[in-house]
Amino acid sequence: MPYLKPERPEKVSAPSLRASKERGERLVCLTAYDYPTARLVDEAGIDIILVGDSLGNVVLGYGNTVPVTLEEMLTHVKAVRRAVQRALLVADMPYGSFHTGADEAVKNALRLVKEGGAEAVKLEGGHKRVHLVKRLVDEEIAVMGHIGLTPQSINKLGAYRVQGKTAAAARQLLDDARAMEDAGAFALVLEVVPREIAQLITESISIPTIGIGAGVHCDIQVLVLHDMLGLSFGKQARFVRPYANLHDTITDAVSRFADDVRNGTYPSEEESYGLPAEAADELHITATQKSKSEKS
């Protein structure tokens, strides 16, 4: 079925994503972690904004997503909520926030929704998370699933690797996807899986798939904003396409500002505020004194 250009509804919602899949539309998802970038992303027409626990890597300076806390997530979700008007706002449930029982998972998800303003939450895992997804959905919380490479499992995986490379592993991913759909997830992230498996999953379930390193056949594509803008450090994954190089842009701007300050060309007279003549006369600031001050 050929993909069509989306009609751009007024407000994106979890149910509207399935309708977009049925119409064959390609949608777009990006991460955002603060007010200004979230506002720019939303105004650019992005359909889903994910406040991902990737903020641990690209904003907070952690080596991976494991240390990110619920309180840190809440701070960033609140900031993004203030900016977003049209996009569907999804918040990651960080590592440890849904691992100690369904009641605790519901409590933490409710905080992301009630305090943070998220319209949905995302959690990692396949079959072993089905009971949590069902419970959250029963509590009227929209849930986005996430299978394939699950970064929160880095200590178990040992390294970030392509998932589903064997027939058995691929079948497990397909089973996980169907289980997530049956549990009530409204969409499913497929991270770093072979494009053939991503296509098979996309064609086998009725909920939208969101690909990151999963090929072109997913219904929705997502990237980490900092990665695509050149604001990340270190080697990038092969699926990251750089759309800008803000690393060099920012470095150049900061260096030129520092040079101007050090050589005395910033601030200029036009960038400063002068004292009104009447006040200058009263304070006996003469033109000569002013001239000396300007030269010093």
Image (spheres, helix red, strand yellow):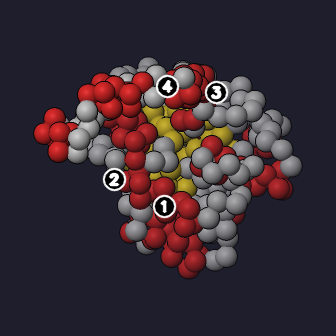
Q: Name the N-terminal-most of marks 1 and 2.
A: 1
* Residue 10 left/right relative to 247: left
Q: Nearer the viewer, residue 168 or 10?
A: 10
* Cα distance in 3D space between marks 3 and 1: 27 Å
Mark toward the viewer: 3 or 1: 1
* Residue 291 left/right relative to 164: left
**Residue holding disc 2:** 82
- Decide: few, some or many residues near mark 2? Use Cα within 10 Å; few <14, some 14-19, many ≥20: some
Residue 210 occupies quadrant? top right
Mark toward the viewer: 4 or 2: 4
Q: Looking at the picture, does residue 6 appear above or below residue 99?
A: above
* Cα distance in 3D space between marks 4 and 2: 39 Å
**Badge 3 element:** loop
**Residue holding disc 3:** 240
Q: Name the N-terminal-most of marks 1 and 4.
A: 1
**Residue holding disc 1:** 75
User: x, y (%) of residue 54?
Assistant: 62, 47
**Badge 1 element:** helix
User: Looking at the image, do the residues carrying marks 1 and 4 touch, with CB atoms under 8 Å apart?
Assistant: no
User: Which amino acid does the dot numbered 3 rest on?
Assistant: Val
Q: Name the N-terminal-most of marks 3 and 1.
A: 1
Q: Residue at x 38, y 28 (%)?
A: 292
- Decide: few, some or many residues near mark 3? Use Cα within 10 Å; few <14, some 14-19, many ≥20: some
User: Which amino acid does the dot numbered 2 rest on?
Assistant: Arg
Q: Residue at x 49, y 25 (%)?
A: 264
* Cα distance in 3D space between marks 1 and 4: 39 Å
- Location of the C terminus by quadrant is top left
* Cα distance in 3D space between marks 3 and 4: 41 Å
* Cα distance in 3D space between marks 1 and 2: 11 Å
